Amino acid sequence: MSADEQRVERTGDVAIIVLVFVVLFGYDVLEAVTNLQQLPQLYAAYGMAESTPWWLLVTGVALPPVLLAAALWISRGMRLVPRAGVLLLGLAVSAQLALLLEELARQVAEAALG
Amino acid sequence: MRLGGKSADRVPGVAEEDDDRDALTWEGDDQVEDLVAEHDDEPEVATSAAAPVEAEPDPARSRDRLVAGALLVLAVAASVGWIVVAIGNPVQQPSLLGLAMYQLGELLSIVAPVLWWLTAGRLAPNPLPWRLVGLVVTAPWPLAFWVGA
């Protein structure tokens, strides 16, 4: 087997790596959808439904798929390890943004409560 | 003891000296010595050719390495900031899976600045702009909102 032939990644390997990251990004979406369902009820229970930070909740749902698509687009044609590295970086940025959105939602709630 | 010899038909005296030399040498030894001498010359030539390159470091490369080192220090500082964010995070998870995934997210947040620095260096032909973008994207922004609140 020549060096050029060794560089060709098997489609199955790439599919497994992508599938693992799709599941991990999918969990982020699941968490964001849970927040989208439950947080408005919590705000309503405290009598401040009008203060529900919808833009934060919707952004939280939209960000993981956008970051996954960006990571897949950037890593297209790369070998297996760099591709996994870019996808891991996308997941890490998704986690950071989720923590940032949580902090913003916390401050919105504190401001609404006075 | 004789190491070799086939000199029954040689002149006594002279033949014994020749036999000793025959036993300790091989035909073609002179050629081998010449060959070794030729190869011994090559590293000296290579060393003398490489010496000027080492003696004159590229100033642009030195500057790039300095900038990359400074950006790595900032990335590590951002990671420390995310550690502070993770420690001060009051969120509690109701399930073991939720706790594990949440802590995985916090861990990824902590390693993201340095991971971005490494990935840019590994994949981008010119990593400097990508590393600058990474510093902005992976900065510990929740800390800024804590300070601003």
Image (cartoon, rainbow, N blue to C red):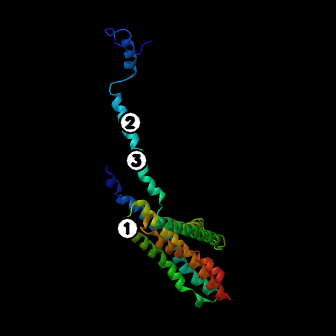
Q: How far apart in space, not on screen, are marks 2 and 3 (Cα)?
A: 15 Å
The residue where tag 3 is placed is B45
**Crowding near the residue tagged with mark 1, few <14, some 14–19, many ≥20 C-alpha atoms within 10 Å:** few
Q: Could you tell me residue A5's position as x and y percent?
A: 32, 54
- Dot label at residue A76: 1
Q: Identity of the amino acid at label 3? A: Val
Q: In this view of the protein, which residue sits in the foreground, A3 or B44?
A: B44
The residue where tag 2 is placed is B36
Residue at disc 3, secondary structure: helix
Q: How far apart in space, not on screen, are marks 3 and 1 (Cα)?
A: 45 Å
Q: Give the residue displayed 53% in from the left and 67% down from the top.
A: B66
Farthest residue to the right: give it. A114
The answer to whether residue B105 shows anywhere in this view is: no
Q: Identity of the amino acid at label 1? A: Arg
For this view, does B53 lie left or right of residue B138?
left
Q: Are marks 1 and 2 in contact (CB under 8 Å)?
A: no
The answer to whether residue B88 shows anywhere in this view is: yes
Q: Could you tell me residue B65's position as x and y percent?
A: 51, 65
Q: Chain of mark 1?
A: A
Q: In this view of the protein, which residue sits in the foreground, A9 or B27?
A: B27
Quarter of the image with the N terminus of chain B is top left
* Residues behind callouts 3 and 1 on a single chain: no
Is B41 placed above or below B81 here? above
Q: In this view of the protein, which residue sits in the foreground, B113 or A113?
A: B113
**Comes first in the chain, label 2 or label 3:** 2
Q: In this view of the protein, which residue sits in the foreground, B63 or B85?
A: B63
Q: Identity of the amino acid at label 2? A: Val
**Crowding near the residue tagged with mark 2, few <14, some 14–19, many ≥20 C-alpha atoms within 10 Å:** few
Q: How far apart in space, not on screen, are marks 1 and 2 (Cα)?
A: 52 Å
Q: Chain of mark 2?
A: B
* Residues behind callouts 2 and 3 on a single chain: yes
Q: Of the residues tagged 2 and 3, which is closer to the observer? A: 3
